[in-house]
């Protein structure tokens, strides 16, 4: 990729190459070390602040997802169930007919209690 890119695009590119980025205070850590070229290191330095902010935001999102845990709800769409993945913080929608009976039962219990998503 060219030099004109966003911090998010750089982060996605590096992850696509199998590079794991973490933060240590205001320092970026990456591994494996041999996967980052000098050109990529220059781009990381250029976008350091943005990459740090993205990694911190992702960490907060994962902590919130872990706090919430697995959530199972009926979707706004008939016959679909929403699942909250505590490992990523993402919501997924799956056809109820493809779910295990216990998942559908959990969604039904939540609906009967009148809970909100």
Image (tube, rainbow, N blue to C red):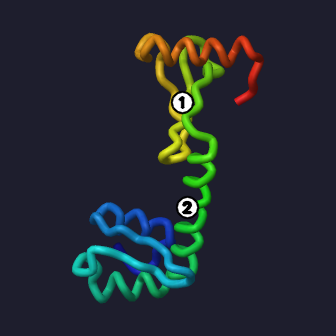
Marks 1 and 2 sit apart, C-alpha to C-alpha, by 20 Å
Q: Residue at x 53, y 14 (%)?
A: 104
Q: Is residue 116 left or right of residue 62?
A: right
With respect to residue 107, does 57 lie above or below? below
* Residue at point 34%, 73% (across, down): 1
Compared with 94, 21 (above or below) is below
Q: Percent from the top left, x then y, of residue 35? A: 25, 76
The residue depicted at 48 percent of the width and 23 percent of the height is 94
Looking at the rendered structure, the secondary structure element under dot 2 is helix
Q: Please tell me the numbered disc located at residue 39.
A: none
Q: Identify the residue position indicated by label 1 in the image.
A: 83
Residue for badge 2? 59
Would you say 12 lies left or right of 18 here? right
Residue 88 image position (x, y, % from top left): 49, 47
- Rendered residue at 49%/75% (across/down): 23
Disc 1 residue crowd, few under 14, some 14–19, many 20+, Cα 10 Å: some
Q: Find numbered disc 1 in the image and state the secondary structure of the residue it sits on.
A: strand
Above-or-below relation of 114 to 24: above
Nearer to us in this view, 104 or 75 = 104
Q: Quadrant of the C terminus?
A: top right
Number of numbered discs on residues: 2
Depth check: give the residue in front, 82 or 110. 110
């Amino acid at each position: 990729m060219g030099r004109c890119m966003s911090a998010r695009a750089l982060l996605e590119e590096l992850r696509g190459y199998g590079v794991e980025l973490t933060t240590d205070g205001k320092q970026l850590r990456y591994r494996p070390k041999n996967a980052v070229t000098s050109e990529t290191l220059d781009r990381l330095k250029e976008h350091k602040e943005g990459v740090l902010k993205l990694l911190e935001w992702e960490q907060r999102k994962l902590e919130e997802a872990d706090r919430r845990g697995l959530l199972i709800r009926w979707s706004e769409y008939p016959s679909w169930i929403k699942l909250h993945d505590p490992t990523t913080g993402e919501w997924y929608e799956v056809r109820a007919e493809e779910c295990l009976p216990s998942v559908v039962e959990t969604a039904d219990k939540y609906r009967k209690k009148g809970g909100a998503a």
